[in-house]
Image (cartoon, rainbow, N blue to C red):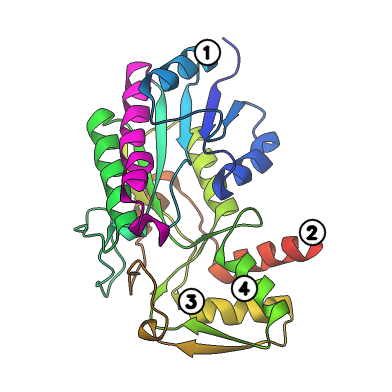
Amino acid sequence: MGKPTILVTGSNGQLGKELQALKNDYPQFRFVFASREDLKLQHYGLVENFFIAAKPQYCINCAAYTAVDKAESEPDMAMLINGEAVGNLAAVCKKYQVKLIHISTDYVFDGESEIPYKEDAATGPANIYGISKLKGEQLCMKEDPDAIIIRTAWVYSSFGHNFVKTMMRLMKERNELNVVSDQVGSPTYAADLAKTILTIISSGKWQAGMYHYSNEGKISWYEFAAEIRNLAGSKSIVHPILTTEYPTPAKRPKFSLLNKEKIKSVYHIAIPEWKDSLKKCVELLQAG
């Protein structure tokens, strides 16, 4: 039979890179990494041919259109990649009995809650990116009810473009920074999420449905930036500002805390505190 194969789509993104970094820790699997160039998910036929050749047992879909502000002026592109392409992938996974883990976002919610969002909370995205990701969730579950969807938030990593790397760069360039203090949530270190996904696959237990994952804790972007400053040993001063003082094309959720009790209880996942994971990432970036 050989080893089970895990196909990772969107392999050049933050999560895809973290999964690549972990592959040697999971020698019981064979990994196939497909970038956006390798596999155009919006073309059903191409996806099917790829699956016939690669013969995966599992698929982790990290492919996404993540330019939140740009999505406001490119809604068709966002809907194609985050919506229709996910439907294609799910349909092929169902046809070939491939177990699919699809990654979604806190942006499917309206951000108006005061308690952490559970998986079955009402959705109501406030921007095009959120609308496109919600469409992807809906198509995923319609085409492949056996799929697992994991919503996450504020993803960062030592790879790719993200808030942590941007802050560290700006703190070297500027003496003062303004960061929004009235949007709260919890960040997600992509390395922790990657490990969680592989833990789920390794468990031998497949419980389809929606799950939430982010690191533990509740902070604002300002508090996040202040801790990055402390860990990086920067002298730059970070000022808290209101969302109204920093207008962006896409509306951002004020509250995006996710309730993670389900993933903890079903898969016995231990979730690190946000500060501990941030420290690891900053150390990696400084060492690099």
Q: Is residue 29 visible?
A: no
* Residue situated in front as seen by the camera: 228 or 85: 85
**Local crowd size for mark 3, using a 10 Å CA cut-off: few (<14), some (14–19), many (≥20):** many
Q: Could you tell me how far apart the alpha carbons at marks 4 and 1 are, in whole angstroms? A: 42 Å
Labels 3 & 1 near each other (Cβ < 8 A): no
Circle 4 residue: 167
**Local crowd size for mark 2, using a 10 Å CA cut-off: few (<14), some (14–19), many (≥20):** few
Q: Give the magenta-colored segment's residue range.
A: 68-97
Quarter assignment of residue 90? top left
The residue type indicated by label 3 comes to: Trp
Q: Could you tell me how far apart the alpha carbons at marks 4 and 2 are, in whole angstroms? A: 16 Å
Circle 2 SS class? loop
Labels 4 & 1 near each other (Cβ < 8 A): no
The numbered disc on residue 53 is 1
Q: Could you tell me how far apart the alpha carbons at marks 2 and 1 are, in whole angstroms? A: 37 Å
Of the numbered discs 2 and 1, the one sitting upstream in the chain is 1
Circle 3 residue: 221
The mark lying in front, picked from 4 and 2, is 4
**Local crowd size for mark 1, using a 10 Å CA cut-off: few (<14), some (14–19), many (≥20):** few
Residue name at image x 22 percent, y 57 percent: 123
- Tell whether 18 sits left or right of 52: right
* Residue situated in front as seen by the camera: 101 or 168: 168
Q: Position of residue 128 (x, y in %)?
A: 30, 56
Q: Compared with residue 19, is residue 257 higher up or lower down, i.e. above or below? A: below
Quarter assignment of residue 186? bottom left
The residue type indicated by label 1 comes to: Ala
Q: Is residue 223 visible?
A: yes
Q: Could you tell me how far apart the alpha carbons at marks 3 and 2 are, in whole angstroms? A: 25 Å
